[in-house]
Image: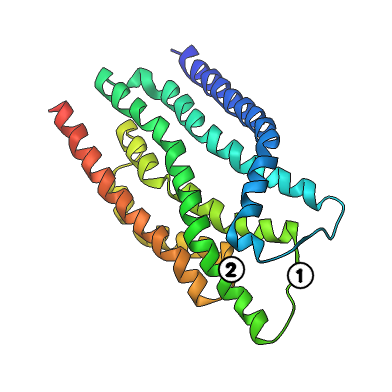
């Protein structure tokens, strides 16, 4: 019996090492894929409106790292969920093991969907709104490539992560880590966190803030609904 907690700690350590290793490998892979991704972004209509400049020696390298990080996050997240599943699966029934395993591949697609949604819908709106003030005062716009990508990723990356929230909530509900009642009682705290997150990733104006906050809150409410459905099915399995 004394060896059981030690076994769990060692097992958890092994899973965390695998996750870290996958992130490093994905980061290297993402660095190799950064250039074609960069060219696609540069060819987008919103990017063609401006000239990219480099204001520091390491700016271009930092852009490559930012793209690599997004790719690594997209690849590592479902792998991390699989490692969590492997860690807790011995305590699940065969039905729960099979159902929760089905969620994992869709995490990647939801993350990509969130990135695409924010890049094609939210980012152009926020970018055009902010640059319109430069046009009003007659200022010429000169952007550094690192500034442009920092602004873009600061906006689209959190939304891509939050897009995974409903599926991660369903996954966690199946594993027994959370319940719908906990999500409901934590709603006001979650809203505050989402408002703070939106304030951190958007420019200091109400339009941009609402464009980001609204889908975040809607996703949280969708997550509660999904958790209710999963929790009800879970109870029906046991009855």
**Residue 89 position within the rendered picture, expressed as x and y whole percent measured from the top left:** 37, 21
229 w.r.t. 17: above or below: below
Residue furthest to the left: 239
Q: Is residue 203 left or right of residue 193?
A: right
Q: What count of labels does the image hold? A: 2
Camera-side residue: 126 or 191?
126
Q: Secondary structure at mark 2?
A: helix
Residue sitting at x 35%, y 35%: 171
Q: Image quadrant for the C terminus?
A: top left
**In the rendered image of this protein, does residue 51 appear above or below residue 78?**
below
Which class describes the residues within 10 Å of circle 2: few (<14), some (14-19), or many (20+)?
some
Quarter holding residue 213: bottom left
Q: Describe the element under mark 1 as helix, strand or loop.
A: loop
Mark 2 to mark 1: distance in Å?
A: 14 Å
Pointer 2 residue: 127
Label at residue 142? 1
Q: Is residue 93 above or below residue 223?
A: above
Residue 91 placed where, x, y %?
34, 21
| Residue 189's disc number | none
């Amino acid at each position: 019996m004394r060896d059981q907690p030690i076994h769990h700690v060692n097992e958890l350590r092994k899973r965390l090492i695998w996750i870290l290793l996958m992130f490093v490998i994905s980061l290297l892979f993402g660095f190799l894929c950064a250039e074609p991704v960069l060219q696609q972004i540069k060819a987008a209509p919103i990017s063609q409106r401006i000239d990219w400049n480099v204001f520091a020696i390491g700016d271009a390298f930092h852009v490559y790292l930012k793209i690599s990080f997004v790719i690594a996050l997209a690849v590592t997240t479902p792998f991390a969920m699989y490692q969590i599943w492997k860690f807790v699966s011995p305590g699940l029934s065969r039905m729960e093991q099979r159902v929760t395993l089905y969620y994992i591949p869709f995490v990647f697609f939801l993350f990509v969907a969130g990135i695409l949604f924010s890049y094609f819908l939210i980012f152009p709106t926020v970018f055009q709104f902010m640059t319109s003030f430069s046009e009003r005062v007659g200022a010429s716009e000169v952007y550094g490539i690192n500034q442009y990508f920092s602004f873009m990723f600061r906006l689209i990356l959190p939304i891509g992560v939050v897009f995974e929230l409903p599926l991660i909530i369903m996954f966690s509900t199946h594993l027994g880590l959370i319940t719908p009642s906990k999500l409901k009682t934590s709603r006001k705290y979650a809203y505050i966190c989402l408002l703070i997150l939106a304030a951190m990733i958007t420019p200091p104006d109400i339009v941009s803030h609402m464009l980001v906050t609204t889908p975040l809150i809607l996703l949280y409410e969708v997550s509660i609904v999904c958790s209710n459905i999963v929790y009800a099915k879970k109870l029906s399995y046991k009855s």
